[in-house]
Image (cartoon, helix red, strand yellow):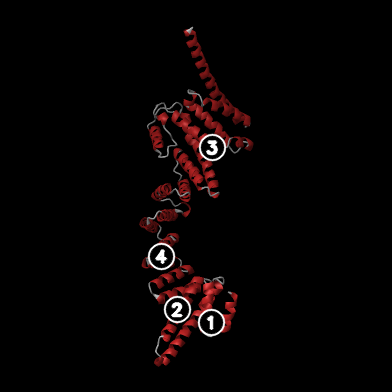
Amino acid sequence: MKKILITAAVIFGTTAVFAQKNQVQSAYNYSKAFDRNGKCSELQNGLEAINSAIEDETTKTWAKTWMYRGNLYYSVLLPTTDKNCKDLYKEALDEATDSYLKALVLNFEDPELKKLDLNKEDGSDVMKFFSALQNKSKVDDESYTGLILGMRMPGLAGEYANKGVENFQAKDYKKAQENFGKSMMLNQLAGKMDTVMMFNTALASEYAEDYEAAKQLYNALIQLKYNVEGNGPSLYQSLSRIHKKEGDKEKSLSVLQAGRKAYPNNQALIFEEIDYFLQADKAEDALTSLNTAIDLEPSNAFLYYVRGTVQEKLENKDAAILDYKKSLELDPKQHDAAYNLGAYYFNKGVDKINEANDLPLSQSKKFETMKAEAKKDFESAIPYVEMANKAKPEDSDTATMLIKLYTQVGEYEKAKELKAKYQ
């Protein structure tokens, strides 16, 4: 009796294996049928069969099981596949990718190579995979490797890239990072260094605040001298910003300076450098960078205004006045330049009034002289403050200064009229 039971078990086990083998073959046949007629039912039947086969202890270890499964899910992604059919398998992209990756490693004859995980984050198994290919490690079916790496991976990479763009536009930066990263990885498996996708992944990583990943990618792109569509300088800008956010100001500056060396005439990097020096209260360094920026863009009114403020900090008042006037010459609507210039003359007049008021009664002649000089300063200030008021009429500080100036020079009606507007 015992002997009969053992025999029955062997027969049952063998039957089950054949049944799963048939499922794999059926999946292959359904895939081919779909290629011929494009019927969604063929895909459904094929996926039902192959998803049964991947549950079996024997057939789930076969490269062809995962190859056929990858092919079926890949068919879902084809532009010609019916949309209703696509809607049944929203996960088709990930399933096709995972299936092909498993097929690649299970295709090796070496048991250790079959254990490789090409999704491993540190990329170590990918390196082992390429090493195995270079060493021509034996595989069950060479056509699988060629088809997957040469034809399927580029298509899947493109799908992930498209999803990444959609995610980025929807401001789902973490998902964009993930999908761009997958696209980059699949292209690398296919033997292509996709630096554009690396840049997209770096940008999404930065926006997702995964700064470690972003720094690694930006540094790699810098090493590769990436400058597609003129984005080379932006690598340094982004990397510098990340270091700044992390509180490493010295590293932030060193990255900017490396960028300036690589792209000496790039205005964006110069502006970043100027901003850094201004925030660090390094006026002399800021002035040097501003001089370079103005040499490159002599018609930029804003640059003259900024240089004027730096000249004031350095107490180069005559140079500051010239810069403010040049800024207004180029752009009469440059409010801040007009306001600062008016404030300069206004404060100059106020200082003379205060000095005159401190004089003893015996110096009445000097008192009158200084009052007259102060009035001239106020009169010099008025056109610039009027210009600033016109450029930004909603600014109450500008209006207040102008009211004071009108009062100081005896234009009381103008002062009254302007004051009424802001009450």
Foreground label between 2 and 3: 2
Mark 4 or mark 2, which has the lower sequence index? 4
- Identified by mark 1, the residue type is Tyr
**Number of numbered callouts drawn:** 4
For disc 3, the marked residue is 93
Dot 2 alpha-carbon crowd within 10 angstroms: few under 14, some 14 to 19, many 20 or more: some
Q: Secondary structure at mark 3?
A: helix
Dot 4 alpha-carbon crowd within 10 angstroms: few under 14, some 14 to 19, many 20 or more: some
Mark 2 or mark 3, which has the lower sequence index? 3
For disc 1, the marked residue is 406
The x, y position of residue 341, in whole percent, is 47, 76
For disc 2, the marked residue is 347
The x, y position of residue 4, in whole percent, is 49, 8
Q: What is the quadrant of residue 359 in the picture?
A: bottom left
Dot 1 alpha-carbon crowd within 10 angstroms: few under 14, some 14 to 19, many 20 or more: some
Gap between marks 2 and 1 measured at Cα: 14 Å
- Residue 171 in sight here: yes
Mark 2 or mark 1, which has the lower sequence index? 2
Q: Secondary structure at mark 2?
A: helix
Tell which of 402 and 183 is nearer to you: 402
- Identified by mark 2, the residue type is Asn
Mark 3 or mark 1, which has the lower sequence index? 3
At horizontal 49% and vertical 82% (from top left) the residue drawn is: 378
Q: Secondary structure at mark 4?
A: helix
Mark 4 or mark 1, which has the lower sequence index? 4
At horizontal 45% and vertical 81% (from top left) the residue drawn is: 350
For disc 4, the marked residue is 278
